[in-house]
Image: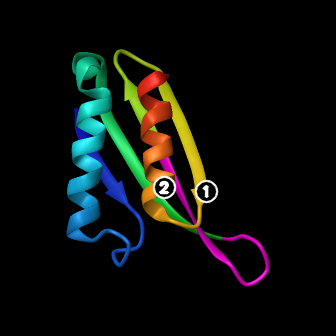
Amino acid sequence: MRLQMRGPQSDWTEALRRHAERRLRFALGRFGRRIGLVNVDILHVTGAPGRLDKTCRIVVHLAPKGRILVEDTQKDLYLAFGEVVERAGRA
């Protein structure tokens, strides 16, 4: 399972990168043979007036073909990431 993390560099702190890798490997590791690539994207979106939210999107590319797409938007990036990892693991 290969991980590709994309988005603004300021969001991908070393702590978040380690957290993301650990959570993804725990949630998806048992499916390692069926997963080729996992894309993790962070996007900034405008929420309520004056509020900047963060969207975390995970795309799991399955072998031989297929994919799972999960995304969530929260004010806190760690909350959004935790939610999408949990849903991706269930999917």
Check disc 1 and report its element: helix, strand or loop. Answer: strand
Q: Residue at x 40, y 50 (%)?
A: 40
Query: What is the chief secondary structure element of the magenta stretch?
Result: strand
* Amino acid identity at mark 2: Leu
Q: Which residues are magenta?
A: 46-58
Residue 73 - label: 1
Which residue extends farthest bottom? 50
Q: Position of residue 63 (x, y in %)?
A: 34, 18
* Picture quadrant of residue 75: bottom right
Residue 65 - label: none
Which residue extends farthest right? 49
Q: In the rendered image, which quarter contains the N terminus?
A: top left
* Amino acid identity at mark 1: Thr
Q: Residues within 10 Å of mark 2 (few under 14, many from 20)?
A: some
Q: How is the image coloured?
A: rainbow
Q: Where 54 sits versus 23, above or below?
A: below
Earlier sequence position, callout 1 versus callout 2: 1
CA separation in Å, label 1 and label 2 = 9 Å
Q: Residue at x 30, y 39 (%)?
A: 24
Q: Of discs 1 and 2, which sits in the foreground?
A: 2
Q: Position of residue 17 (x, y in %)?
A: 25, 59
Q: Which residue is mark 2?
A: 79
Q: Where 1 sits versus 50, above or below?
A: above
Check disc 2 and report its element: helix, strand or loop. Answer: helix
* Picture quadrant of residue 41: bottom left
The number of callouts visible is 2
